[in-house]
Image (cartoon, coloured by chain):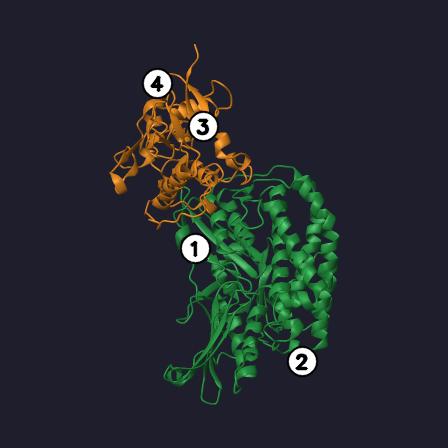
Amino acid sequence: MSSDLETAANRDILRRVAIDPISRVEGHGKVTLLLDEAGKVHEARLHIVEFRGFEAFIEGRPYWEIPVIVQRLCGICPVSHHLAAAKALDYVVGAVPVTATADKMRRLMHYGQILQSHALHFFHLASPDLLFGFDAPVAQRNIAGVIAAHPDIARQGVGLRRFGQQVIAATAGKRIHGTAAVPGGINRHLSATDRDALTAEADTMVAWSQAAVALVRRLHEADPALYDRFGCVPSSLMSLVRADGAMELYDGQLRLRSADGEILRDAVPSHDYMDFITEAVKPWSYMKFPYVTDLGPEAGWYKVGPLARVQNCDFIPTPLAEAERRAFRAYSGGAIQHASLAYHWARMIEMLHAAEVIRDLLPDPDLTGGERMAAGPRAASGVGVIEAPRGTLIHHYWVGDDDLVRWCNLIVSTTHNNEAMNRTVREVARRELSGQTLTEGLLNHIEVAIRAYDPCLSCATHALGKMPLEVRLLDADGACVDQKVRNG
Amino acid sequence: MSRSTFLLDGQSVPFDDGQMILEAARAAGRYIPHLCWHPDFPPHGSCKLCVVKVAGRHVSACATPARAGAEVESDTPEINTERRTLLQMLFVEGNHFCPACEKSGDCQLQAMAYDLEMTTPRFRHFFPDRPVDASHPEVLLDFNRCIYCELCVRASREQDGKAVFALTGRGINKKLAVNAESGRLADTDFAADDKAARICPVGVILKKRVGFAVPIGERTYDRAPLHEVALPKSEGDT
């Protein structure tokens, strides 16, 4: 692992290969490789090619509109943005803490979101690579292939995602882009009808999530040479944890753990993120590169998301997921796992945790009744941090006395992983591609590594099965010497 | 003495002398689309959504007196297509972003678009630059959504006795203005309980800080379509 492939010394005489767009991820990105005549990789970069500009056009809008408008960033994880914005604006309206009803409704919504997003990513987007192999025929390497070859796995995957979406609909009002979380609380209760319908399926969802963890674990155990090595980039890990060190996805304090497991920073209040994190800019990417300020950009970058969270917490506060976390740690003899494919295992452990949380939360009477709103002294700003499916999500707003947003800062999960994903791309390019004749399957290795992070590249809705892959080989003069096009 | 009648889409509608087509239809439980018309005010005739066809001519039902024996066409493919076109022009003229608008579900413009099955704005968006006025402590003005119905202008002038609002400019440069030297709502005698504060059919005049208190799905036009909500609930309730 090193950054030696970030920028080639002699870029203008190298061949350029572009994977554009990267498929089976959310949003649009591309990878460029610069190769010499012998096919040796001299440069590998992950580019984010979309610019959304939400931070700018939110300015000047009334604060109560923000949780609804900002979630339009994403069609996969809108709940995360919806809740992070509402949490930040709770401070503005003095609703700290919110009522028990608001807290539990939001948590239920959030864990529904974790469940559906993790199921979507693993079963629909990532599992074809793992079940059929990175070089499997393209015609098979998709969710339709999974349905044909492994109908039970596919059925459970679709069912888990459907259940998560139903939890969201019951709490947020809609499956996508609901409006329930408002600054200061929540605008609805859970209906008894929805509660009963969800409760009837909750145990099944826990069982299916357990099966999903077992599936990934079997894959790891069957081929440790691949799973333990592929795209392995050691780094620090950052996430929220509860005050007692438990996994906590809705609210908590920041913890940073070193690549070898030592806790470097702990109990960092989330509203201190600006002192804790700095965002670096590189001239070739629209996406910033965050790092822990006092460690500097070279040592201070980190990973977020399931792999960070499962290894950053001291325990998971639900029994089945905690047992799986222990198995995960035991697999590596207690050492921190950094291989990119371990993300999938950690992600499924979190999905199991989410299913347990939902099952245990549903009977709570605070969901179906009780005070929904709180209020207190007004504040000029607020920070909301949440663990979105893909990692730590930070929303920060300043609101004027006239109720309009004056300034806003959003650091989305995928941004935290920018450096890690780029290093993973370079690692895979160097180990798997350099000096080889490029094939579609070989290029898919790069995509497999990126996919493991479950990036939401533009926080935009993913068009499943409709994302073409076009790879062009250009000679040193920029002329196209070879081209491969793949449609969905 | 029996009242005179006219035919609305082939069905008889009674009317009183001097009554407009829209009023008579409404009193008879028949809906003709409208945005700028309001039972508390004289006909305005600006939105043109109440267009009907009488003797081959397209006229505003709100401002055309009913005549005995007249044949009025309203709910026909031809007239509804014309209404959809008018709606599409209203949508592109302002900045109507329903997905994040706090008036969604309570907005007559949106409800009418659903009612008339408008599926796309079709025309090029103007994307006008219309800053909001958040100066008033209780009420926000979001001019992005104004359709120039002048209901707030009329309510403020005729019912509140204040003349807080006015339309200025002409044609494509027309805009809703606040009647103060500074142009700011805070510098008028406008109050949150004015009639003008509660009459906007779209999302311009908004009570602050409560935008999403009522969940989507439980709002006026979530419960019933506009053509039902817009009719008087009982006789005499016009």
| Extreme residue toward the bottom, this view | A38
Seen at 35% across and 18% down, the residue is B18
Q: Find the distance from the CA under tag 1 to the CA under tag 4.
A: 54 Å
The numbered disc on residue B18 is: 4
Q: Are marks 2 and 3 in contact (CB under 8 Å)?
A: no
Q: Find the distance from the CA under tag 3 to the CA under tag 4.
A: 21 Å
**In the image, what residue type sits under mark 2?**
Ala
Q: According to the image, label 3 marks what residue?
A: B10
Q: Colour of chain B?
A: orange
**In the image, what residue type sits under mark 3?**
Gly
Q: Secondary structure at mark 3?
A: loop
Q: According to the image, label 1 marks what residue?
A: A54
Front position among marks 3 and 1: 3
Q: Secondary structure at mark 2?
A: helix
Q: For residue B145, what is the image quadrant?
A: top left
Q: Colour of chain A?
A: green
Q: Of residues A474 and A100, which is closer to you in this image?
A: A474
